[in-house]
Each structure stands twice: as C-alpha cells, then as structure tokens.
Amino acid sequence: MDPLSGIWLALVALCAAIVNGAVGYGFSSTITPIAILWYSNKVLNPALVVVEVVVNSVLLWRERRFIGRTWVRARPVVFTLFPGVVLGTVGLTYLAVNDVKVVVYAVLLPLVALQIYGFTRPFRNEVRGSASIGPGIGFLYSLTTISGPPLALFLRNQGLTKDEFRATIAQIRVAESSMTLGVYAAFTELFGAKLISLPSLGLLPYLAIPVLVGVPVGVLLVRSLTPEFFRRFVMTVDAIFVSYGFSVVLVSLKWLSKTGSYVLLSALFAGVAVLSYFGLRRVRVLDATGPVRGPTAGFLASDAGPPPPPSDPS
C-alpha cells in the first residue's frame, strides 16, 4: 500500500472516530466518501466493518444501562436487517466499482442535506416504520458500510432522549455490522467473492489506531459543545466531501465533462452553504438535552422494562 495514502486514510479515520465518539454514529459515513477515491469498496468495506464491530460494541457497552428501555425500539429494525445485508453483499460482489461509488454518493447527499436542515417527520406507527426500513438499512450498510444518516434521520424524529438515541442506534449498528461481517466471510468462503482479503486486512492498522485515539476525544468533545450543533456541523463538512466525490466519479464515468463537474460542484456547494446557514441558525433554539419532536414511546412502555438509572451529570 502507498504510505502516503495510508497516512491520509489514518487522518480521515481519526476525524471520523471523533465524530463517532461524539454523536454515536458517523464513522463510515464520514470516511467512506473520501476513502473510496483511493480504494474500491470491495477492499475498503470489510476493513471498515471489522473496525465498526468493535467500535459499536464499545459504544453499546457505554450505554448499557439504557438497553432494557430501548431494545423494544431497536428490535423491529434488528429482526429485519438480514435479507437486506445478503442482497447488499450480492451487489458489492458483482456490481462494478464505480457503480457502487455512484450509489454511495447519490444516497448520502439527500440524507445529509435533510440532517443539516433538521428535517423532522415522525412515524405514527413506529413498529411498522422500523420494520419497513430494516431491509433497506441492511442493504445500504452491506453495500456501502453507511447506515448512520438514515438511521439517525428516523430515530431522531421518534421522541428519544440523547442517551436513548445512543443506546438504540448502538444496538442496531452492532447487529448490522456483525451480520455483515458474517455474510462477507460466508461469500468469501462459499462463492470466492474475496471480500475478506489481505489488501483489506492490511488497512486495519490505519483504521484501528485512529479509532483508539479519536473515539475518547469525541466523547470528551461533546461535553463542551451542543451535540445538535456539532452533529449538523459534521454533516455540513460531510456534504462538502460527498459533493466533491460525486463530481469526481461522474467525470471518471464520463457522465460529465470537467466543465460540467465544476458547474455541478459549484451548485452543490451553494446548496450546502444555504442549508448550513439555516440549519445551524435553527439549532440555537433546540433543547440539546431533551427529546426531539415526535411521538413518545408510551405505546411501547409495557415492553420497555424499568426506567434506567439517572445519567451521569458529567
């Protein structure tokens, strides 16, 4: 592996790990849009999944006192992930590399834009809504290693507090990353897909070491910043990377000329700037410690178990 690209990958992984430690998700959605400019998804995805199994498990352990209360929220998604994970792995195995990159950017861009602005539209029937998005989340994750933005968009509209949100999303992401790693290994062994390979495993040191440093930094950072403001700021930076990567891939596929890519990139940057201005302006009036707008979990209370102990005020 080129040492320079390894250094860049480690720096991006450090930034992504800080984001993940602060908001509970965002590692793959921050690193993937940049890293796929250097590596194919077939090499990058397995390494990211291995790291995310560990990272998500640690974050779930950190929020373990809320598992009893939030498992009922995570369960419908967890139980419907597997078909999507298998289908996404099929796509990763047989689709062309650039086609997968187009899917990554095309899916990320609107989801990131909605999060920057702070879109809210809760599901009235949360169980049905959770079960309906589960296969899509599994498909998107196994194909691209990205699921944080759509999951966050769904969960943040359902009346969860910050701690409940972290616990719920951690449970789902532990399940999806573990399932995906198992399916990757099965496809490698049974169908010769070469998803678990030496080039992929060679990326692990460049990802694991920044994670060990960045996640604790993110946990400390969020204590001094408004979490919602930090999240939208991160999404703004993410949108810039996604816009740039999208234009590069379209040029490489010859869908756009270089002049056309400059026009598209300028338009996307302008859109991001406008959304960021209004999104960050709106966040000043939000209560960062309480639940976001949306239905409460009252109809699930019988399954939720006893309330968790009070949070650590620190």
Image (cartoon, rainbow, N blue to C red):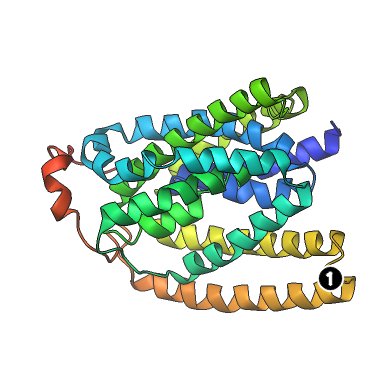
- Tell me which amino acid carries mark 1: Leu
Residue 121 shows up from this direction: yes
11 left or right of 23? right
266, 144: nearer the viewer = 144
- What residue sits 38% from the left and 34% below the top? 60
84 left or right of 246? left
- What residue sits 39% from the left and 44% below the top? 169
Residue 153 quadrant: bottom left
250, 262: nearer the viewer = 250
Considering the numbered disc 1 on the image, is that residue within a helix, a strand or a loop?
loop
151 left or right of 141? left
Residue 197 quadrant: top right
**Residue that numbered label 1 is attached to:** 256
Work out which quarter of the rendered image holds the C terminus and state it: top left
Residue 226 shows up from this direction: no
How far across and down, in percent of the image, does residue 132 sit? Answer: 38, 54
Q: Residue furthest top?
A: 189
